[in-house]
Amino acid sequence: MNGFLLFTYTASIAISCMTLALAIASRILHSNPWNGKFIVFQSMLIGILVMALASKLSLFFMPQSIYRVFKFIFNTLMIGSMSFVIVFLPYFLGWVIARPWRRAKNLVFFPMAIVYLGVGIASFIVESKVFDFWAVLAQTLIVLGMYIYCIVVLWVNLKNIDDKPVRNICLTINIVSLSLIPLSILSVFFSVVSDFSYPIYILAFSIVALVYLFVRFGIDRQEEQNKPTLDYESLQRYKISEREFSVVKLICEGMTNKEIAQELSISVNTVNNHVANIFNKMEVRSRIDLLKILKEGPWS
């Protein structure tokens, strides 16, 4: 393994891990439904990189006989991960553009993934340069077919993505994907290009996703700063008193009546009276109804 190839793998793994960390942080802070799916996808990409790198490095640290066993294990895991991606990427794309995953797609992408996995494993068992060429060609055509399908579907359905930052990042991913198609074709005929293809694909995707996550954090931070806060004046139309407003804030924090009484140094009966008055003034019957009104208000 030459130094530049090692650098490419290392850089791709580092950027991919940063992207995964930001995605996890975004999931914790904002709980966006797409984040969970993206975390799974990004984890699989990192797994592919680690398995590919481990397969190449094992040659330098293990005897030839043991190296062959480990290479088979690493490459099988890598191909298994890639087979998963062949199914998962179209599924994730369908979710992003709000097009449901239909049963017909199972009859297309699952067989593609199985064939990709089978051809990959067979290429490790059959020692033939001719077979290796056709195996690489078949795998490339499968990935390229899935790749082009995703590019076309994403391009056609960009207008269905309501979130402008998401729409812009999808457009960027489309442009980057189109620029990498020649690399996929060259990887069939040149083994050197094939070695670089996986890390370059994942590096390009991870950089785009990383930029998006940074932009998304900036937008969320700006929205949070500009977000109106729930204050005493906000509830004046309900004729809430200052003491009742203090109770409302503590209810929003999830405190029970007993905890509110301890926090405000008043009796539980007094808190019960305040809560009853709040319910009456805001025309609600329970805390759930109260929190729903507060959540739907202009300050939410």
Image (cartoon, rainbow, N blue to C red):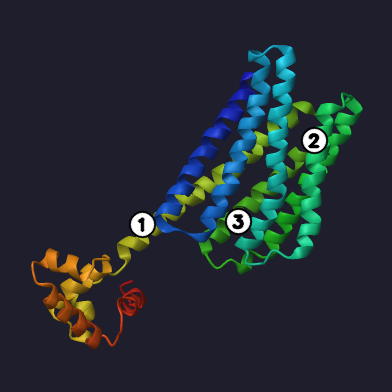
Few, some or many residues within 10 Å of mark 1 (<14, 14–19, 20+)? few
Residue type, numbered disc 2: Gly
Where is residue 258 drawn, in percent x and y?
A: 18, 68
Give whichever of discs 3 and 2 has the lower sequence position.
2
Assess whether mark 3 and mark 1 are in contact (beta carbons under 8 angstroms): no
Q: Is the residue marked by circle 2 packed among few (<14), some (14-19), or many (20+) residues within 10 Å?
A: many
Q: Residue at x 74, y 38 (%)?
A: 183
- The residue at 62%/34% (across/down) is 49
Q: Nearer the viewer, mark 1 or mark 2?
A: 2
C-alpha span from label 1 to label 2? 46 Å
| Label 3 element class | helix
Amino acid type, residue under disc 1 in the picture = Arg
Q: Where does residue 167 sit, x and y in percent of width and height?
A: 57, 61
Gap in Å between the C-alphas at discs 1 and 3?
22 Å
Farthest-out residue, top: 63
Residue at the extreme right = 130
Q: Quadrant of residue 64?
A: top right
Secondary structure beneath dot 1 equals helix
**What residue is shown with label 2?**
120
Q: Determine if residue 299 is in view.
A: yes
Residue on which disc 1 sits: 221
